[in-house]
Amino acid sequence: MMDLDILSKYNQWNSELEEKYLKLWPEAEYHIWDGVISPNDYFRSPLKILFLNKEAYDTEYDSYDISEALKDELELGKPIFNNRPIKYNFKNRLFVLNLISNLNQSYLTDDVYNQYSNEEFYHDMLKTAYCNIKKSDGKGKSNSLDLRYCFLRNKEIIEEQISFLNPSLIIGGNVVDGIIEDSFNWGENLYVSESNVISIYQLVIKGRTYPFFDMYHPAKAINHSIERIELFKALKFVNEKYPMFWKNRCNNACFID
């Protein structure tokens, strides 16, 4: 498929879904839409990652598409997000996930991580999708009951996003407990960390199963070395229990109805 065809198909679907979403929230003061940051890069990436977080917030209550805003910043090589922990939490997670096809312990050192440049991180971030549970009237601080209400109202929209984007895996930013846990179908748990740093569940959407990483919210200040070790350990545990598991998650067909 040519780049223009990819972009056209994605844009048409994305526009129609946003219109559908707006009809669900006619009373909203503003909304921040989301999705794939760079459709062509996502489409061509063997490993397709969808970040699912809580809510987007704008101090001026302006409506815009956060994925397009991120794309513009990334392509200009600008720092993304004003919140320093968020940037480095995304960078930390993408660094480890890029090891998914070669789970060699020697790559996990701080020295190797420090060689992962911002330019490489920005390029990898372009290949991801970025979605939120709450897309309208976001607040500076999340409330679980409010997020739960928004999720139930948005559930069909989020299911459609996951199904169409068909990611290799989903990274959740502390959105399971009290928000989505009892409203989706789940398969076998793949990994549960004793330290609560990470758990890997299996989310079932429209008959397809997605590894779902339940991790700290990306705005949380954490010890990155510990998180890298825990995430790597989780990836390796799953791959040893189910050989070729992560390789088989790559090269998913995406932008499918």
Image (cartoon, grey):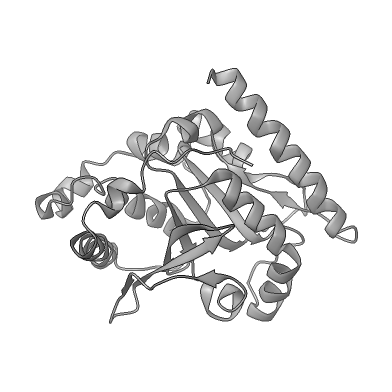
**Res. 141 visible in picture:** yes
Q: Is residue 184 above or below residue 6?
A: below
Q: Residue at x 83, y 52 (%)?
A: 22
Assign the C terminus to one quadrant of the image: top right
Considering depth in this image, is 65 or 172 the residue closer to the camera?
Answer: 172
Decide if residue 140 is on the left or right side of residue 171. right
Decide if residue 129 is on the left or right side of residue 229. right
Q: Residue at x 78, y 54 (%)?
A: 61
Position of residue 165 measured from the top left corner of the image (x, y, whole percent): 56, 44
Position of residue 97 measured from the top left corner of the image (x, y, whole percent): 31, 51
Position of residue 25 measured from the top left corner of the image (x, y, whole percent): 84, 59
- Number of numbered callouts drawn: 0
**Res. 219 visible in picture:** no
Quarter assignment of residue 223 = bottom left
Q: Residue at x 67, y 72 (%)?
A: 147
Position of residue 229 measured from the top left corner of the image (x, y, whole percent): 21, 64
Considering depth in this image, is 229 or 84 the residue closer to the camera?
Answer: 229
Residue that sits furthest to the right in the current view: 27
Quarter assignment of residue 125 = top left
Residue that sits furthest to the left in the current view: 106
Decide if residue 240 is on the left or right side of residue 7. left
Q: Residue at x 63, y 57 (%)?
A: 159
